[in-house]
Image (cartoon, helix red, strand yellow):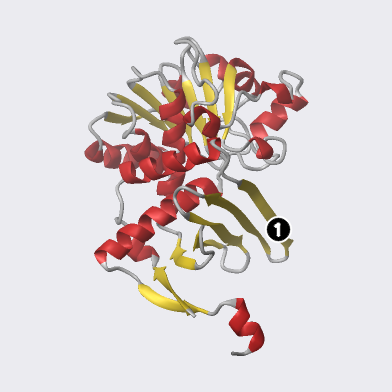
């Protein structure tokens, strides 16, 4: 038997700062760039009741951790449930099991921020955000740890949502955060653009992007859903989290290929290759760059292991026991 730490969503909430998430996830992507294995999501769908079961995995050898995510969404509860196992990458023993609900926006936001840090201009001071939900909140808080933004413009279709989001973030960030009436108003003068939506169609016109803009898109992990139009993909240095998922579920890239404006050769490099220094990111001040963040176990394992270590230091969590297969199979 081995003791494993179980952490509830409440125990995970507030355990780490956005900057700590970004540091851990950046290290995870550096390891990916140096060969750490990671697999894109797999998704099983159910028609009645409608829902999906999704999972992905990664090994981070230098962190000493491996694991991933498994979550269900929809079905009878019409909600989502996130389960995160973390294993020791040397012994294989389970280290922790996390309820990943409260971690989710922060680890996803951290991945977006790693993309901003790797690809956006150092002097970026303005940010346009499309979306005002929990994922948008995580993206904004994380991005603010890697660039000194002075102005943030937020758009989402519901006026009350974008205004309440802007008021909340205005109190939490040093930047001035304001709601705007259209995605065009958020995007056209921004140094950095972040999309965090559930949209199935592009949320802004790629012709509006100024030269030198960086775009992080995190809501397009379905082959028939896209936040970015073909113009944006065509104009940009395109960097996905995992190259393998580009033709699998990167909806915006798939659509751009189908429209004939790019080919698969348009993929510049994986984010990990840029973070590790194996491939250049931005090569000029005029480049438009895109980080397509569909979600991987790289950020999940990196963040979950960081939370596990912090929880141990603070005496949080409860222990559960796992039996090794040798014991269970022999009955010893």
Is 98 or 31 nearer to us in this picture? Answer: 31
Is 161 or 210 nearer to us in this picture? Answer: 210
How many tags in the picture? 1
Q: Is residue 226 left or right of residue 162?
A: right
Residue 212 makes an appearance in the image: yes
In the image, residue 242 sits, relative to residue 327, either above or below, namely above
Q: Name which residue lies at 69% across and 66% down.
A: 49
Residue 196 makes an appearance in the image: no
Place of residue 292 in the rendered image (x, y in percent of width and height, measured from the top left): 56, 33
In the image, residue 142 sits, relative to residue 123, either above or below, namely below
Q: Name which residue lies at 43% across and 56% down.
A: 304
Is 328 or 113 nearer to us in this picture? Answer: 328
Q: Is residue 300 left or right of residue 166?
A: right
Location of the C terminus by quadrant is: bottom right
In the image, residue 119 sits, relative to residue 21, either above or below, namely above
Please identify the quarter of the rendering in which residue 258 is found: top right
Place of residue 96 in the rendered image (x, y in percent of width and height, measured from the top left): 44, 66
Q: For the residue labelled by badge 1, is the local secondary structure a helix, a strand or a loop?
A: strand
Please identify the quarter of the rendering in which residue 233 is found: top right
Q: Name which residue lies at 33% across and 17% down.
A: 123
Q: Is residue 87 left or right of residue 328?
A: left
Place of residue 191 in the rendered image (x, y in percent of width and height, measured from the top left): 40, 19
Q: Name which residue lies at 43% across and 22% down.
A: 120
In the image, residue 304 sits, relative to residue 325, either above or below, namely above
Residue bearing the label numbered 1: 44
Please rate how many residues cluster around mark 1, counting C-alpha atoms within 10 Å: few if below 14, some from 14 to 19, many from 20: few
Place of residue 109 in the rendered image (x, y in percent of width and height, measured from the top left): 43, 42
Q: Is residue 26 left or right of residue 241?
A: left
Is 125 or 183 nearer to us in this picture? Answer: 125
Please identify the quarter of the rendering in which residue 51 is found: bottom right
């Amino acid at each position: 038997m081995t003791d494993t730490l179980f952490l509830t969503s409440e125990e995970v909430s507030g355990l780490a700062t956005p900057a700590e998430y970004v540091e851990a996830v950046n290290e995870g992507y550096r390891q990916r760039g140096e060969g750490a294995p990671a697999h894109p999501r797999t998704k099983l769908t159910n028609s009645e009741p409608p829902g999906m079961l999704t999972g992905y995995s990664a090994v981070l050898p230098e962190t000493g951790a491996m694991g991933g995510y498994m979550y269900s969404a929809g079905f009878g509860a019409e909600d989502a449930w996130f389960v995160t196992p973390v294993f020791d990458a040397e012994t294989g023993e389970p280290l922790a099991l996390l309820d990943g609900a409260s971690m989710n926006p922060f680890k996803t936001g951290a991945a977006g921020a790693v993309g901003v840090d790797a690809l956006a201009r150092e002097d970026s001071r303005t940010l346009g955000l499309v979306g005002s939900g929990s994922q948008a909140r995580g993206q904004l808080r994380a991005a603010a740890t890697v660039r000194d933004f002075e102005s943030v413009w937020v758009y989402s279709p519901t006026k009350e949502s974008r205004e309440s989001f802007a008021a909340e973030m205005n109190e939490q960030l040093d930047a001035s955060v304001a709601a705007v009436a259209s995605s065009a108003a958020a995007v056209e003068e921004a140094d950095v653009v972040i999309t965090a939506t559930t949209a199935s169609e592009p949320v802004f016109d790629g012709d509006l992007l100024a030269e030198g803009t960086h775009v992080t898109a995190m809501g397009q992990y379905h082959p028939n859903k896209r936040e970015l139009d073909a113009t944006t993909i065509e104009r940009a240095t395109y960097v996905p989290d995992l190259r393998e998922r580009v033709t699998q579920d990167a909806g915006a890239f798939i659509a751009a290929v189908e429209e004939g404006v790019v080919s698969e050769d348009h993929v510049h490099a994986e984010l990990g290759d840029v973070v590790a220094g194996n491939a250049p990111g931005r090569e000029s001040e005029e480049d438009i760059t895109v980080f397509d963040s569909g979600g991987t176990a790289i950020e999940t394992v990196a963040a979950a292991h960081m939370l596990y270590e912090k929880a141990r230091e603070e005496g949080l969590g409860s222990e559960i026991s796992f039996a090794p297969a040798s014991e269970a199979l022999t009955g010893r």
